[in-house]
Amino acid sequence: MIRIGLNNEEKQQVIDEYLQKKQLKKVFVFSYEKFPSQLKFPGIETEYIGYADIIMYKFFYRLLEEIDDDCLLVFDECMRTQNRSDLTYNCAHHYCNQTSRKIVFERFPFIDDYNDFMILLDLINKGKYKGKSFRGYFLNDEDIKVKPHRFTVSTIDIPISDLDRKRYEKKKESLFANLGNKDPDTIPRNLHIFAGDLKKPYIEPNKDYVARNSRFNLPNVITYKDVEQKDYIIIDFPHRRLDFNDFLKRTGMHDIIFLNSTLKVDLYYLNELRAWIERLGEFYAKASLC
């Protein structure tokens, strides 16, 4: 069973309905440490295991002995890397082979693109989907239900002086000249920070903002790791898509507002987000036909 897009209350309803129909010996709940599972299984022995502990020897061999078809495995927001062959996923597959009873919860169907959804299908039936790329008809092959999350993106465009544009171009040239053996992704990362610095005069004291780091030293500008369930204006995006997905989970935001310098690096990150939202909508459309 795979359920996409549910909040905690909706997940618990799925669990409650499942427990009315099934007799279980034990439940193992796996969840990422920064999003600890809040699911409850009254009257049933339940063990909660952190995502990082899935690969630990102290769990691995014991779980292989304990898990059988009278046990339920619940993976609650465990898609943490796009690497389908990741060691953590591989260890989880060993656990999944021990029982047919598995429930997978994820807020979004993928981290960045369709093929990430195969990570979830692998948890249900690794042998069936091994080595296969995503196909829309796979959504018919398993017990899959999807609750769509729709997003809008708007910008607050700020004026950038000719001098600052020249400084930006000089910064870009310097980054390329000194790249050497460094990761090329350091160039857009650094340029995005540079563009973000130009936005400080346009930060309004009565609004909440989020930035990559705490360099602004303002009470209404916080970092992505400190966000709460509320709306924020984006000063700069995190480089990793997964980090922004986590931000959307934590805040519950659906209407995204970006403080935009209109410099090319800002447009790059903005267009990448819009492309992700478009892919998300296409996936939801495929799921609605199943």
Image: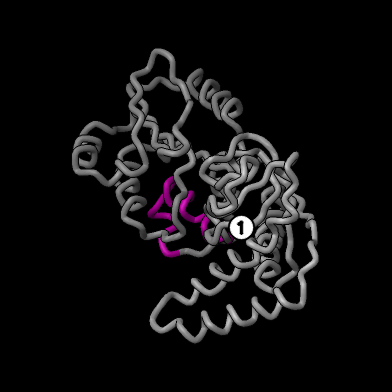
Q: Say if residue 110 shows up in the picture.
A: no
Q: Is residue 119 magenta?
A: yes
Q: Say if residue 201 shows up in the picture.
A: yes
Tell which residue pokes out farthest to the top in this image: 43
Q: Residue at coordinates 75% horizontally, 39% vertically from top-left? A: 206
Name the main secondary structure of what is drawn in magenta.
Answer: helix
Q: Which residue in the protein does label 1 denote? A: 237
Taking 92 as reference, is 248 left or right?
right
Is residue 178 positioned above or below 79 on the image? below
Q: Position of residue 113 (x, y in %)?
A: 58, 61
Q: Position of residue 178 (x, y in %)?
A: 45, 83
- Name the colouring of the figure: one colour
Question: Considering the numbered disc 1 on the image, is that residue within a helix, a strand or a loop?
Answer: loop
Taking 247 as reference, is 104 left or right?
left
In terms of image quadrants, where is residue 22? top left
Q: Residue at coordinates 46% horizontally, 53% vertically from top-left? A: 119
Q: Is residue 57 magenta?
A: no
| Residue extent of the magenta highlight | 113-131
Task: Residue type at mark 1: give it.
Answer: Phe
